[in-house]
Image: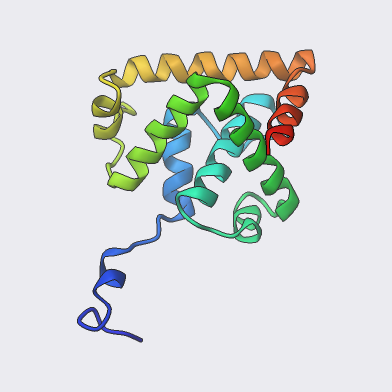
Amino acid sequence: MASASFAPGLARYRRISLAEIDAAVSARLGATRGLGNSQPACFNRQVAMYLAKTVGRWTTTVIGRFYNGRDHSTVCYGTQLIEALRESDPEVDALIRSLRNQLKNGNSIVANGESDASRSSFGLSGADLDKLAELIVTRICTLIQNGTLGQLSEAGEARK
């Protein structure tokens, strides 16, 4: 194993754990684990999977195992869906950027669910960001129920 004196870049890098990512998403959006595939928990889990892949650099197999043994293709689908939503919905993009900043800066979540990053990233209070997150989840659930979410996913794939 290389010591910090021989590999100074390695000493600064600390992979964000899946549990930390899951806790940050759960604190902001709500539970990521639930019975079956309830829509809010499903969207929240997809956000956490996306962040685990892009920020935490975890493999889809490891992420799937963390979320109750889901297949790696389920993780791939979730990350692609969130990427398509980010491209088509600025509110989702703002939410993801805020969570990403919170995780990268290592800001802990305090008792009321508000983090240092959430207060400073967009000049919004934690309560305002919570309201925004709730609106996004409600909007996603409506899109899923109307069957238009699949069209957004296909539109995102067509752009690639």
**Which residue ends up furthest to the right in the rendered image?**
147
Residue at 44% x, 16% y: name it.
Answer: 132
Rendered position, 75 above or below 118: below
**Which residue ends up furthest to the front in the rendered image?**
159
Asked whether residue 36 is in view, the answer is no
Residue 159, x across and y down, in percent: 68, 33
Residue 119: quadrant of the picture: top left
The C terminus, quarter of image: top right
Q: Is residue 149 left or right of residue 3?
A: right
Residue 147: quadrant of the picture: top right
Residue 108, x across and y down, in percent: 28, 41
Q: Is residue 148 left or right of residue 83?
A: right
Residue 104, x across and y down, in percent: 34, 47
Rendered position, 47 above or below 2: above
Residue 79, x across and y down, in percent: 62, 42
Residue at 29% x, 18% y: name it.
Answer: 124
Rendered position, 49 above or below 9: above
Q: Is residue 99 left or right of residue 126?
A: right
Residue 125: quadrant of the picture: top left
Residue at 67% x, 47% y: name it.
Answer: 75
Asked whether residue 143 is in view, the answer is yes
Residue at 43% x, 56% y: name it.
Answer: 17
